Image (cartoon, rainbow, N blue to C red):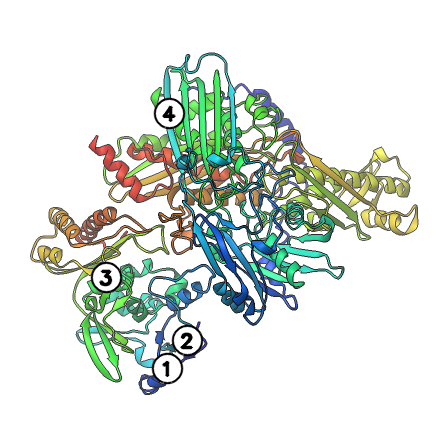
Amino acid sequence: MGGGPPPSVSLSLFVKEIVVEKNDFKVVNKRVLKMDSLGLACGEPVFTDDVDINGMLYGRILWSPYAHARITKIDTKEAEKVPGVKAVLTYKNVPRVPHTTAGQGYPEPSPYDTYILDNKVRFVGDRVAAVAAETPEAAEAALKLIKTEYEILPAVFDTFEAMKDGAPVIHDEKDAKNIPDARHNIAAKFEFEVKNGEWFKDADFVIEHSYKMPYLQHCAIEPHIVITCFDPFGRLVIRTSTQVPFHVRRIVAQALKLPVKKIRVIKPRIGGGFGSKQEVLLEDIAAALSLKTGKPVKIEYTRKETFISSRTRHPSTVRLKTGFKKDGTITDAEMDIVLNTGAYGSHALTVMMCSGSHTIPFYKVKNNIKFLGRSVYTNLPVAGAYRGYGATQGFFAWESQMDIMAAKIGMDPVEFRKMNYIRLGEGSPVFKAMGEGREGVEQVITSIGLYEGIEKGLKAINWRAKKEKNKGGKGVLRRGLGMACMMQGSGIPEVDMASATIKMNEDGSFNLMVGATDLGTGSDTILAQIAAEVLGVKAEDFIVYSSDTDLTPFDVGAYASSTTFISGNAVKKTAEKVREMIIAVAAKILDRKKEDLRLEGGKVVANDGAACGLSEVANTSLYYYDQHQIIASASHYAHTSPPPFAANFAEVEVDTGTGKIKILDYVSCVDCGTAINPELAEGQNDGAVLNGIGHTLSEELEFSSNGTPLNASFRRYKIFNTLDMPPIKTFLIPTFEPNGPFGAKSVSEIGINGPLPAVANALYDAVGVRLFDSPFTPEKVLAAIKKAGKK
Amino acid sequence: MPPIVVKPPTLQALWRSLPSFGGARRYLAGGTDLVAGANAAPAGVKARPKGGSFDRTEVWVDISGLKELRGIKETKTSLMIGAGAKIAELEASPLVRRWLPVLSAAIPHFASPSLRNMATIGGNAANASPCADAVCALCAEKAQVLLEFKGKRRKLALPALFKGPKKTVLRKDELIVAFEVPKWKHSGAYLKLGPRSYFGISKAAVAAALEMDGEKVRSVCIALASVAPVPLLAVKTANYLCGRMLNEENARTAAALVKTEVSPITDVRSEAGYRREMCGVLLERALNSIASGVSGIN
């Protein structure tokens, strides 16, 4: 047995020390009830669609039937004559402003290659025109009467074909911005090398493989939906299912040439996002229809539209070439990723960067590192943000290859990982080199519970005993075990910013106003827990209002696993300011020194036992003495992005007759620092794992030879559901992240990265075949088994 | 749904009033194919389920109120299953459990519990999908189907109802009223390979019903789903098995034989070659499971 505790004993001591403090938590790290859960379970009207506005029109969009074509003629006269139709928009009557739909910090690192409407269509399902009418039926009828003539252009669907000289140029428009090489359809490109001597010189072995993932859709329960209307002052109000309300405000202002002050964005409750709603997808066109008609407009995607005309995961080809020594040292790593960004470059650069920046630093590479990333336009649906954000694609390659390398040198794959993963206090040149649109930030690991996670997982899945039992398996059903380790980030360092405001009320309750965007994730609840912990009250003493650009302070939104870490820190700072204000008032009431006072159990308590209730403090400040509102705001942005770590273990049973893989057991151990709400953290991870299992065994969006999606419905695109759910066990491995609020790191994305490599490795363990392209359908598995048998 | 849906109270009233319902008309039973198909149609994107194109001017004739189509009755030689019987009723029926082992094994694979509460066995047949689990199972049970038009009845072997995907031999306005399934002392199995644990259309499925005479097979019926344009009876394979011992070797030969009888296609759900192969694997497993006395495992 190699391995043993890594040379980070000091970490363990550090953790132990903190554990004492952790045990003192009153609200944080507790299973507090999600504050909107009862209302949601009882069907309260809280979603975007749950309001009726007088005179609301129904918006519908005409979609391109061609993968690549220029609109030579578009005639809307007949459509406009349909009774009830109030507006028909084409590229001729909307502003032409190149922008990106990616809801990212300004200036967005994605190319400006999108228009509200254009005279060119770039995939089957691209926007051609839009209609607003008094009834959905009238809108549908009008769509059919829009007469469009197209000049059909040659289309390209393969990324490698698209990069060739002479390939159809998808973005030939002159006014697009920040496309590095439009002629070769390259939407984003990045190269990076660390060179310490000759490539592969020290390596005993060199291995190279390519790993592929297909088009995948998020399948959030609530489809994309927006309602635009006007307030009494004629300002545009956008009620929308979004992860990024503040970016929506800015990008809609940009695309429609409106001042930001003319727009208010409200995010109600959201039925899931998973990245698909980090996107300004419908708000611009609904707003354009409202501006044209002066009326409220609603647009809601059907499920089919969600599959085709929203966003997807970037299909990927990762070529990974690694050199390593017999003793388990990894000497060289060359990672070359080609992403298919589809017709537009939303998140084209940043997903590609994260595929490297979240994976390469994870294992120590002694000598040389090279990364080449390209995001390539094709005439297929638009890729965007999707939980895991490139790391999913990257870890499939890395964690499969780790097993291949370990097998080559006859080392236990678990020990091989233990030997090489990044340790406490260690950094990587990659952190600095690879940022998201600008240079990255140098950082070292300040908390890691991976060793404990691996040990816990081995025990929970009964790794050693099962390995022994499965040896030399015969018969039709074969069992195997596989594991994978991974990390993610916690927000984008020196890019993401969040802020909060806390206001005190007479009864000692507080309003917490945050820009942070609860998508069903529970962030409203955990942010209240953080504030409550600071102020010595209960989470339910907070009335949380989130994500309204008029009423809450700024937050970049819910993405990049940032909310707990970035918004949580902003809330903590705000609460600390309020605490000072409360203590200042209480010091007068109690006639004690401020430094002798603390907040506890809803009171201000002095060291000598004197105390006064928070309502007394509030009433004093509001009505009796030196009157003022106890209120504070604070912002947070971080200089590091402390990675959460995870170790995943899968036991599979492979039916060698049918090729069907059944996951018998799945263990996921996650170090997310302090789990602010363990129940919600576990739920996030369980969901991420099941999402990843769907990627692994079933999901793939398929296309005909002319680029038409073939399975854009739940009838044909199978996501896994409760009955498919293997016994997933999530274990939270507590560590204390010094830069996080009460030691917290992120938890939302990391879990999706595990199933694909863990199951790939388990499949190999069971039947000795390895698949390099997902999903691992019975057809592919059986073909691989047969191929291996013939050799 | 179209603007006009009529609901006759009795079969007689249906036949009487039918001519007044205008040109295009269609029967509505459980609605799980018809309504879902129609709902998918006005999506803005051209989306219509195969063969289920939706014409807003057509009249739907709701037959869910017809008592004549209800119930599961036992006669001396057979079970009479009303076309309006819900799949969930079949699932709960002691008669079905006692006499129809293949159908009993197939029902858990039929869509989802909520769809089984709505869907009818008649609708499942009328929809004429080659993937229909309950229909495939009934074919193996040697079911006959009873059709009626204005009081005139005819009876067909169930497989003869189907002409192709979504196509039947039903004449205009002819209605499926019942299924007559013989009572015979057989064991059965239904094995399905789908895209996930449940609620998915099969890549391939095999239904096998088998009556033994001592060590030898007295009578056998094998039906397959999703591997031909219609629910398919594997006649050659059944003939081969008849009179032979039910052992592993014969099961293997039957498996090889059944692969020559099917004509699967490659589509979004699976590949032709894989499907053909699976017919063999599933049949072999079905026969072996029956031989070992376990029916309907998957």
- What's the distance in space between the residues labelled 4 and 2, CA to CA? 61 Å
Q: Are marks 2 and 1 in one subunit? A: yes
The image shows residue A720 at horizontal and vertical percentages of 42, 49
- What's the distance in space between the residues labelled 1 and 4, CA to CA? 68 Å
What crowding class fits label 1: few (fewer than 14 Cα within 10 Å), some (14-19), or many (20 or more)?
Answer: few
Q: Which residue is mark 1?
A: B22
Which is nearer the eye, A391 or A39? Answer: A391
Compared to residue B93, the image places residue A94 above or below, namely above
Q: Nearer the viewer, mark 4 or mark 2?
A: 2
Q: Which residue is mark 4?
A: A208
Residue farthest to the left, as pictured: B243
Res B151 visible: yes
Which residue sits at x=35%, y=75%?
Answer: B26
Q: Secondary structure at mark 2?
A: loop
Which residue sits at x=41%, y=12%?
Answer: A201
**Mark before the other along the chain sequence, 2 or 3:** 2
- What's the distance in space between the residues labelled 3 and 1, CA to CA? 31 Å
Q: Nearer the viewer, mark 1 or mark 4?
A: 1
Q: Which residue is mark 3?
A: B230
Mark 2–mark 1 contact, CB under 8 Å? Answer: yes
